[in-house]
Image: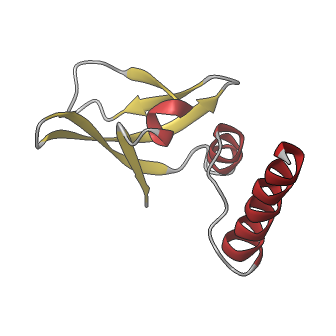
């Protein structure tokens, strides 16, 4: 009987997967997909919005320079910032600690 219940749960998750993802739903975001998107944006200007805590954020402007397996490098505008380059992890995007806007 426990095997039957286990099969019912698997069937339910298969149905849920089909319903959400196969019929036009959003695919789950992964670190690999974030890196792949950033690989295509190297050299483009961007705006970084960092969340600092309760209703606080900081905005910086720069250019995406390099991507590595775990981090990516942004060269900041010299006019606005004392630091020339910063690095962020792909998990910062995944957890919404930072937001990148290209253009």
Q: Residue furthest front?
A: 1
Q: Residue furthest top?
A: 83
Please, is residue 77 above or below residue 18 in the view? above
Q: Nearer the viewer, residue 25 or 82?
A: 25
Q: Position of residue 76 (x, y in %)?
A: 36, 32
Quarter holding residue 2: top right
Q: Position of residue 74 (x, y in %)?
A: 46, 31
Tell me what residue is drawn at x 11 percent, y 43 percent. 55
Tell me what residue is drawn at x 88 percent, y 46 percent. 3
Q: Quadrant of the C terminus?
A: bottom left
Tell me what residue is drawn at x 65 percent, y 51 percent. 37
Please, is residue 101 above or below residue 82 in the view? below
Quarter holding residue 19: bottom right
Q: Position of residue 70 (x, y in %)?
A: 63, 22
Quarter holding residue 49: top left
Q: Nearer the viewer, residue 79 or 30?
A: 30
Q: Position of residue 80 (x, y in %)?
A: 19, 34
């Amino acid at each position: 009987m426990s095997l039957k219940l286990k099969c019912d749960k698997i069937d339910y998750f298969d149905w849920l997967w089909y319903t959400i993802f196969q019929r036009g739903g959003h695919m789950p975001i992964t670190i690999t997909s974030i890196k792949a998107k950033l690989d295509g944006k190297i050299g483009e200007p961007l705006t970084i919005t960092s969340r600092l805590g309760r209703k606080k954020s900081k905005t910086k402007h720069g250019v995406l320079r390099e991507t590595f397996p775990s981090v990516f490098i942004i060269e900041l505008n010299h006019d606005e910032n004392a630091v020339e380059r910063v690095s962020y992890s792909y998990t910062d995007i995944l957890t919404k600690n930072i937001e990148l806007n290209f253009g």
